[in-house]
Image (spheres, rainbow, N blue to C red):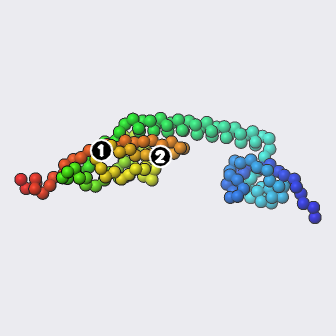
Amino acid sequence: MKRSHRHVSVILNKDLEGIGFAGELLSARAGFARNFLLNDGRAEVATPAKIKQREAELAKAKQRREEEVTTRTALAEKIAATPMETTLKTGQNNRVFGSITAVDVTKKLKADHGLDIDKSHLHGLPIKQLGSTPVSVKLGLGVTATLNVVVTGQQAATEESATE
């Protein structure tokens, strides 16, 4: 029995582990393509028209990604320009009670900027001190903003001052 060494160009329709990703153009042996890739619709034969269509789709996707990156970069600059101000209760000697958590920051970002960010995308929290603290906010697509959180103290009422 003679083995065929003929190759066929195919475009993958699905991500296949160890083979490639969806939309990828690859060259496979004819038998493998016929029996495995083309059989269940995992790939399709790469005709010149389909290759041209694939290249057009890739160009559109690249353009959409660039637009999204510029939008997120502008949002990152907006976030960095406006510091987030918040207060914590303090006791004697400006000792802080509680902390500023990721949940507090996400609520504030949603209220101020309309951003719905997962708390796992915030780094540098919790904040347990007064003053200014930078918090890193991952916006996706490689864009990261630095939010400046300014914490001021609010004197808590003590038992002694409540009885007077």
Circle 2 Cα neighbour tier, 10 Å, few/some/many (<14 / 14–19 / ≥20) = many
Q: CA distance from mark 1 to mark 2?
A: 23 Å
- 10 Å neighbourhood of mark 1: few (<14), some, or many (≥20)? few
Q: Secondary structure at mark 2?
A: strand
Three-letter amino acid code at the position of disc 2: Lys
Looking at the image, the residue that sits furthest to the left is 164
Q: Nearer the viewer, mark 1 or mark 2?
A: 1
Q: Is residue 58 above or below residue 28?
A: above
Q: Which residue is mark 1?
A: 131
The answer to whether residue 45 shows anywhere in this view is no
Rendered image: mark on residue 96: none
Counting from the top left corner in percent of width and height, residue 115 is at 43, 43
- Residue 66 spot, x, y in % from top left: 58, 37
Q: Residue furthest right?
A: 1
Task: Say whether residue 3 is left or right of residue 75.
Answer: right
Q: Position of residue 45 (x, y in %)?
A: 79, 49
**Quadrant assignment, res 56:** top right
In the rendered picture of this protein, how many numbered marks are placed on residues? Answer: 2
Residue lying at 79% horizontally and 50% vertically, measured from the top left? 27
Q: Residue at x 18, y 52 (%)?
A: 92
Earlier along the polypeptide chain: callout 1 or callout 2?
A: 1
Is 83 or 31 nearer to us in this picture?
83
Name the residue beneath numbered marker 2. Answer: 138
Residue type at the position of mark 1 = Gly
Q: SS for tag 1? A: strand
Image position of 52 (left or right of 65): right
Percent x, y of residue 69: 54, 38
Q: 72 left or right of 24?
A: left
Near-viewer residue (69 or 152) = 152
Q: Residue at x 34, y 41 (%)?
A: 84
